[in-house]
Amino acid sequence: MISHMPRVNAILKSSKYQKWLKIIEQAEQKRKFCRHTMEHFLDTARIMYIISLEEKLGINKELIYAVALIHDIGRAMEYERNIPHNHAGSQFAEEVLAECGFSDEEVNAIAGAILSHRNGLNNENSLGRLLYKADKLSRLCFNCKAEKECYWQEDKKNFEIVY
Ligand SMILES: [Fe+2]
């Protein structure tokens, strides 16, 4: 089968990615709030891609999927070593993405977008802005049993389908 996104699939198949994914899955087994699963990563990627198409931003599809796949993978180190997940995630990007075929410029763009995705600040590049927006929009607050207890500000919660 022809791979349409070989570099993205190289991230997915990397041993470090799989290892960190398992750590997150274990740590979040009993979490009642949003989990950080493959479903969340792909929901985020697809919403980013839709927005990019709608706004005719022309951002490379593999960049979008790479940033979405990695943006919360740093949770593994947050759970294990108390390192903020945006920092661990951007470091992950710097360590793994070159091996997967991304250029230095692409690695910097992805690492920067991940670093700033927690607060939405310094999102002067469109990749970071899209990540911040799609990350939030991917969550199904309107269908969540724990919504009332969730710490998210009311205006950030999704009470209707947008994408
Ligand atoms: Fe996220």
Image (tube, rainbow, N blue to C red):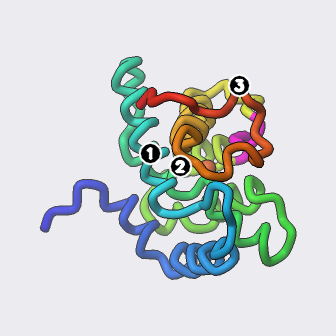
Question: Please, what is the three-letter code of the amino acid marked with disc 2?
Answer: Val
Earlier along the polypeptide chain: callout 2 or callout 3?
2
Question: Please, what is the three-letter code of the amino acid marked with disc 3?
Answer: Asp
Front: mark 1 or 2: 1
Residue labelled with disc 3: 155
Q: What separation in Å lies between label 1 and label 2 (alpha carbons)?
A: 8 Å
Q: Categorize mark 1 by other alpha carbons within 10 Å: few (<14), some (14-19), many (20+).
A: many
Is 152 placed left or right of 13 in the picture? right
Cβ atoms at labels 1 and 2 below 8 Å apart? no
Residue labelled with disc 2: 67
Quadrant position of residue 31: bottom right
Q: What separation in Å lies between label 2 and label 3 (alpha carbons)?
A: 25 Å
Earlier along the polypeptide chain: callout 1 or callout 2?
1
Over which residues does the magenta segment extend?
A: 115-119
Q: Does the magenta stretch include residue 59?
A: no
Is 109 placed left or right of 154 in the picture? left
Residue labelled with disc 1: 45
Residue placed most toward the observer, 82 or 128: 82
Q: Categorize mark 3 by other alpha carbons within 10 Å: few (<14), some (14-19), many (20+).
A: few
Residue 146 at x, y = what percent? 67, 52
Task: Please name the residue shown 86% across and 69% down the image.
Answer: 82
| Main secondary structure of the magenta stretch | loop
Which element is circle 3 on?
A: helix
Which element is circle 1 on?
A: helix
Residue 156 drawn above or below residue 13: above
Task: Please name the residue shown 49% across and 68% down the image.
Answer: 99
Question: Please, what is the three-letter code of the amino acid marked with disc 1?
Answer: Ala
